Image (spheres, rainbow, N blue to C red):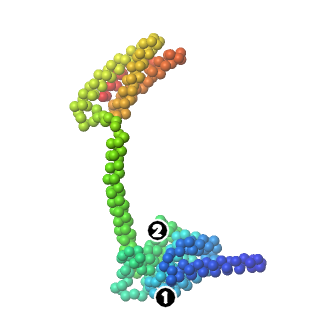
Amino acid sequence: MDFLFGSAKSTTSQTQILCKKIDIVTSPHSAEQQWDLIMQIVDGLNADSNRAKRVLAHLKRILEKAIATSSDNQQLQNCILVIDALSRNGNDNVLSVIHTHFLPVLSKFIISAESASTKFQSLLIGAEDSKTCKDRVLELMLDWQSADECNIDQNKYPNFRATFVHLKQNGAAFHKIIAERERLRKQQEAEEKNRRLQQQPEQQESEVAEQKQFNDAPTYDNPWSNKNMAFGRWYKAKLKADLSKLIDLICMTQDIISMKNTVDGQVMCMELREANKRLITIMLRTHDAAAMDCLLQLVTINSSLLDCYKKLTTGQKFVVPGVSRQFLHIITKSL
């Protein structure tokens, strides 16, 4: 009944179209890789398991014919390219056929009769274009073992691993492929490193030019650094004297705010605001953890007093921090 409605004819027609596309991409007269047609073939085979078997049987006949012609020809290269694309992009319909029918053919091709002196001799010597068909098949066999390259389930398709082991036992120099790939990887890394090194002087020159043009802010020495010890000792001594005055100012401000004296409190808070600006500036420029902690605590106390004065002027309830002079001197001892 399905045949009466034309489904069988449609399936046969689609199979013939895919076989024709196989003929085109594996033509001995075509040296150009036709990826658009190859991906159309992959999509068509993934859609129907029966169609995949018939089309891949046609591809196998072309492969066997190309191998019988010579061990290295254009049609054989094209067949290997199509098989590679199918193994990377095909679903179980495709992989099962490659696993069952193509692996024996490719394995036999690799260990075909050759003299012992020439066996695997040309492997990966020279540029990409100088690789023989056997080189490409060996690379394909090695990629099939890698989860990163093809992600083939070795438990479901054990012949991929068995064929690899069989070829290795018969002298296939997979180690040469690995060594050559590692050499190319290191060469690419070296070229990339050299390219970055060549770009760095240009970037540095542009950064220096930008700094000269835009960076007109004065540069301050860090008083806690070892670059200028004489300046550091002088600055720290001056800073400690100023902090001692700030401690007196904090204690006086607490008493004035507690007495709700807004007139004197306004003057004292003006001094605290200026002190806070200086403390924050110094804190942002230092890398000493103890100094940062000391300055941050003083900034917090000052900010709390300023907040209390603001609440006093607006008639809100407030709680004075109530820090003692002794506690403030203990804080500054860390400097």
Rendered location of residue 251, percent (x, y): 38, 16
Marks 1 and 2 sit apart, C-alpha to C-alpha, by: 30 Å
Amino acid type at circle 1 is Ala
x, y percentage for residue 135?
A: 42, 78
**Label 2 belongs to which residue?**
146
Q: Is residue 290 left or right of residue 63?
A: left
Q: Position of residue 3 (x, y in %)?
A: 75, 79
For marks 1 and 2, the one nearer the N-term is 1
Residue at 52 percent of width and 70 percent of height: 88
Identity of the residue drawn at 35% across and 51% down = 203
- Secondary structure at badge 1 equals helix
At x 53%, y 80%, the residue is 26
Q: Is residue 81 above or below residue 331?
A: below
Three-letter amino acid code at the position of disc 2: Ser
Point out the frontmost of discs 1 and 2: 1
Residue 194 drawn at (x, y percent): 33, 60
